[in-house]
Amino acid sequence: MFSYYGSKTRIVQHYPKPIHNTIIEPFAGSAKYALNYYWKDVILYEKSKYVFDVLIYLQTASKNDILKLPILKMGESLEDFELSDIERKFMSFVINNGATGGNKKVSKFALPWQATKLKKAANNLEKIRHWKIYNDTFENCENIEATWFIDPPYQFGGEHYKESSKNLNFQELSNWCKSRQGQVIVCENTKADWMQFTPLVTIRGTAKQSTEAIWTNQNNNYTQLELI
């Protein structure tokens, strides 16, 4: 629905498919995994009030609400336009790639993609009307049988998530993940050591590459892939 730091847009198809009718994302972010299976019963928990507000806005907005939003030129600021507070919050993701929110000026990397982002968001609105979205922490998720897609702030690099990574105890998180009922998929980087993660896919960027990894309680075999 929007560009977010750590989003799984490029690699979502490589994760195991859900085997339950209910999908729970305890660290929702932009909820790319849930969006890939949007027709299922989706339950999102998002600690950040900023991100939660954007999710609720998109769940209740009309297509026209999104398509009427401005396309910024280089050097322009969101404060140059008459926008509501929630529109500014959403647009802060549109005008930057892989952001965590709060930006006011468009980046040169996001500049040519603004219209495309708005159209994609507008076309996805109806898909998320039935979702249940809570402004709450993962500890308060009801432990029901479901497909749990757990994508927390990473052990190394989680500082980018600010509020969501504050006071996160990875050993406690590991025990919590293992206690979930149903199918459990935990996302991380191969550098992490708080669970026994298996390499999933290597992402090649312009300056560096990184290898995404997962832990799952299902018996599956994975072949490490590369993205160019």
Image (tube, grey):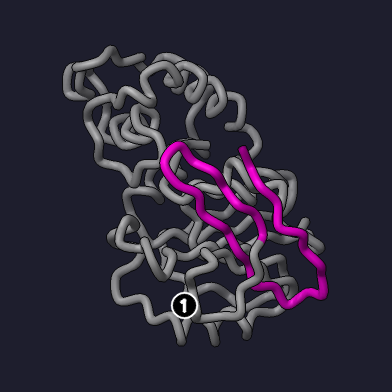
In the image, farthest residue toward the front = 207
Q: Residue at x 28, y 31 (%)?
A: 88
Residue at label 1? Answer: 139
Quadrant of the drawing holding the C terminus: top right
Q: Position of residue 97 (x, y in %)?
A: 40, 35
Q: Position of residue 94 (x, y in %)?
A: 39, 29
Q: Specify whether 151 is left or right of 105.
A: right
Q: Residue at x 50, y 56 (%)?
A: 28
SS of the residue at dot 1?
helix
Instruction: Tell me which amino acid carries mark 1.
Output: Glu
Q: Is residue 62 above or below residue 43?
A: above
Q: Is residue 109 above or below residue 203?
A: above
Packing grade of label 1 (10 A; few <14, some 14-19, many >=20) is few
Who is closer to the viewer here, 217 or 192?
Answer: 192
Task: Give the extent of the magenta segment.
Answer: 200-228
Who is closer to the viewer here, 106 or 134?
Answer: 106
Q: Is residue 168 above or below residue 32?
A: below
Q: Position of residue 6 (x, y in %)?
A: 46, 51
Q: Specify whether 103 is left or right of 38.
A: left
Q: Residue at x 81, y 62 (%)?
A: 19
Q: Specify whether 172 is left or right of 143.
A: left
Who is closer to the viewer here, 168 or 89?
Answer: 168
Does 220 lie within the magenta span?
yes
Q: Residue at x 29, y 70 (%)?
A: 166
Q: Position of residue 172 (x, y in %)?
A: 46, 86
Does 127 lie within the magenta span?
no
Tell how many labels. Answer: 1
